[in-house]
């Protein structure tokens, strides 16, 4: 083999090795610096980030990680939109409730960014290693002996689910007008507190089937409603309840949606 050919082969080999090495280093750096935001409302999504020249976070990819997310966002394209717009769009497509706490976990060290959201976001910084286990951590779990606080209540109101299908109520004591009838009949001022709820409990027992929860009355007094049916779904760190009530003169059941959340007790 001619000397010139040897140098040429060595040059090609060196160039190829350098190209492969640089590509590997670039790929490794990208992997190490990849930023992900996990958002949990009524479905879990993983939002992969990219940054423009102004270092503005944009969405490069969104993974729908559970069945709820796949149903909620199956026809939505989030790519190239700003992160905060995608976060708000996801929440609006799920609960659209300004009061419920929406959980965000990320390895992007800029938690303050999420204060731009129109919603109530609880954002936490986690290492990439801890984020890898997040899907298992956020699975819905029904907890006994734990206060679930009603979201948006004017006074702290909480339900605790006890063993044996029993329920316990807590409310910060306050004065209110309590009426015997449905439309302001025979009203008087009453102190509403834990003792009041023990005397006039609307729901006395509950039953749980998988992650579906039912609250049942004793057939005598649903706070003087003629008919009431309360069905809830257990979600991560909260319960979403549909309350169906019918007063004595109503033809149909009226439905209201309420959320009950677990708080970080101080």
Image: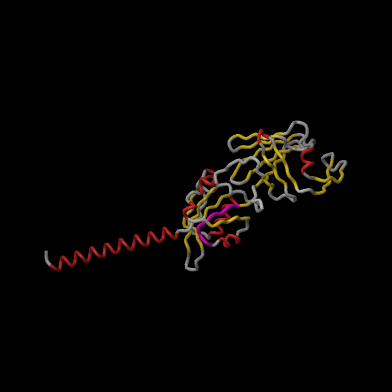
Say whether residue 104 is magenta: yes
Judged from this view, the residue extending furthest toward the left is 1
Residue at image coords 63%, 37%: 213
* Total marks placed: 0
Q: Is residue 214 left or right of residue 200?
A: left
Q: Is residue 153 left or right of residue 18?
A: right
Q: Looking at the rendering, in which quadrant would you find the N terminus? A: bottom left
Residue 16 sits in quarter: bottom left
Say whether residue 125 is magenta: no
Residue segment shown in magenta: 102-109
Above or below — where is 225 with respect to 54? above
Closest to the observer: 77 or 129? 129
Residue 224 sits in quarter: top right
Residue 204 pos. (x, y %) = 72, 35
Closest to the observer: 248 or 131? 131
Above or below — where is 15 with respect to 152? below
Residue 139 pos. (x, y %) = 54, 44
Residue 105 pos. (x, y %) = 54, 54
Residue at image coords 47%, 68%: 53
Q: Main secondary structure of the magenta part?
A: strand
């Amino acid at each position: 083999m001619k000397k010139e050919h040897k140098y040429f082969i060595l040059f090609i080999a060196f160039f190829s090795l350098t190209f492969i090495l640089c590509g590997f280093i670039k790929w490794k750096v990208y992997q190490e610096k990849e930023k992900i935001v996990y958002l949990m409302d009524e479905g879990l999504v993983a939002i992969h980030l990219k940054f423009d020249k102004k270092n503005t976070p944009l969405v490069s990819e969104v993974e729908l990680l559970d069945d709820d997310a796949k149903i909620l966002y199956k026809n939505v394209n989030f790519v190239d939109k700003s992160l905060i717009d995608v976060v708000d769009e996801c929440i609006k497509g799920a609960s659209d409730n300004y009061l419920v706490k929406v959980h965000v976990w990320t390895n992007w060290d800029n938690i303050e960014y999420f204060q731009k959201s129109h919603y109530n976001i609880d954002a936490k910084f986690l290492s990439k290693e801890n984020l890898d286990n997040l899907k298992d951590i956020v699975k819905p779990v029904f907890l006994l002996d734990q206060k679930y606080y009603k979201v948006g209540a004017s006074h702290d109101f909480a339900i605790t689910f006890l063993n044996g299908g029993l329920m316990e109520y807590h409310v910060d004591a306050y004065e209110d007008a309590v009426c015997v009838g449905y439309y302001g009949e025979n009203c008087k001022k009453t102190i509403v507190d834990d003792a009041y709820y023990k005397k006039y409990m609307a729901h006395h027992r509950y039953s749980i089937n998988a992650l579906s929860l039912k609250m049942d009355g004793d057939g005598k007094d649903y706070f003087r409603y003629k008919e009431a049916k309360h069905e809830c779904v257990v979600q991560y760190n909260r319960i979403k309840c549909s309350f169906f009530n019918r007063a004595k003169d109503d033809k149909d059941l009226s439905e209201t949606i309420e959320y009950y959340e677990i708080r970080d007790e101080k």
